[in-house]
Amino acid sequence: MSSAAEQPHSFQPHCQNCSLNAICLPIALETGDVERLDDIVERGRPIHRGDHVYRSEDACEAVFAVRSGAIKTYRITPDGDEQIIGFHLPGEIFGLTGIAGGLHQNNAVALETSAVCEIPFDGIEPLSRDIPSLQRHLFQLMSRTISDDQQLILLLSKKTAEERIASLLLSLSSRMRRRRLSGREFRLPMSRGDIGNYLGLVVETVSRVFTRLQKQGVLSVNGKEVEILEPEQLAAMAGTDWGGD
């Protein structure tokens, strides 16, 4: 991991009292098992915006959980262009794609000052054998990663820019609610350029769509702060149902 040396362990939050443990950990994990997991988790000091957690072709020796901030994963195309493949928010796991081949298949960089938990394979493998619920949870996380990849394919299959952006906003809303935060008002950690890259749109189109949705009263936008004013209308644009509060 490219962040610098770790802070003393006494200053680090533990899995037991972390506000994200309901997302990261199996619900049925016993206190003693949480402590065993806590012993193998490595927590580095904050990663600043633009710092890499890992790069493509680095040895894949751990998976990572976002503790705060946001992480962007991307790959470099044969033409040398950046292609964003995912945004990862607090409580979410990333770095799973390199497990099979032993090397990371993409790059992971901080979108803003962030903190991550590093979970080494040489610690998690024997622990997951001893704790069946942890093993099942890891499988569920891997399944969610596959679902996220499919979500990107679905986003890019949308015909219009409005459909793509509406779908992304609804996905972010759902992930905010998973953290028991507001699904209607939230901050976008990524730039308009990153959104365009991810959705296959030019940045000018992204800005025009946000402006249009604001004029229509669907959204209220102030920089990176977004409020969904008409969630049902936004969901209709995405061709889905609003599942929020």
Image (cartoon, rainbow, N blue to C red):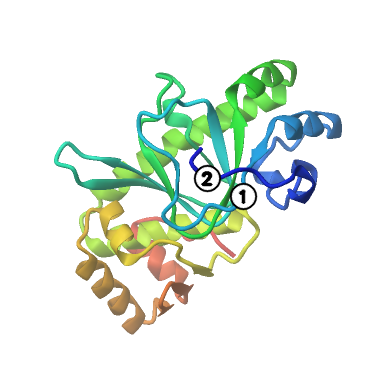
- Of 103 and 21, nearer the camera is 103
In 3D space, how far apart are the residues under numbered discs 1 and 2 (Cα atoms)? 7 Å
> Is 61 drawn above or below residue 243 in the view shown?
above
Q: Quadrant of the C terminus?
A: bottom right
Q: Is residue 111 left or right of residue 13?
A: left
Q: For the point 55% across and 55% down, which residue is it?
A: 114
Q: Considering the numbered disc 1 on the image, is that residue within a helix, a strand or a loop?
A: loop
Q: Is residue 241 visible?
A: no
Q: Position of residue 12 (x, y in %)?
A: 73, 48
Residues under numbered marks 1 and 2 in contact, where contact means CB atoms less than 8 Å apart: yes
Q: Identify the residue shown where x is 80% and y is 29%.
A: 33
Who's the residue at 58% across and 53% down the image? 46
The tag earlier along the polypeptide, 1 or 2, is 2
Q: Is residue 40 above or below residue 101?
A: below
Displayed quadrant of residue 34: top right
How many numbered callouts? 2
Task: Tell me the amino acid under the disc marked 2.
Answer: Ser
Residue in front for this viewpoint, 156 or 6: 6
> Where is mark 2, residue-wise?
3
Looking at the picture, how far across and down is residue 18, in whole percent? Answer: 74, 49
Task: State the residue lying farthest toward the right.
Answer: 32
Left or right of 245: which side holds 52? Answer: left
- Left or right: 39, with 23 as reference point: right
Crowd around label 2: few <14 · some 14–19 · many ≥20 (10 Å) = some
Instruction: Report the side of 35 relative to 226 (left or right).
Output: right
The disc at residue 45 is: 1
Report if residue 229 is visible in the image.
yes
Residue sticking out furthest to the left: 79
Residue 190: image quadrant is: bottom left
Callout 1 amino acid: Arg
Q: Position of residue 192 (x, y in %)?
A: 32, 66
Residue at (45% x, 58% y) in the render? 49
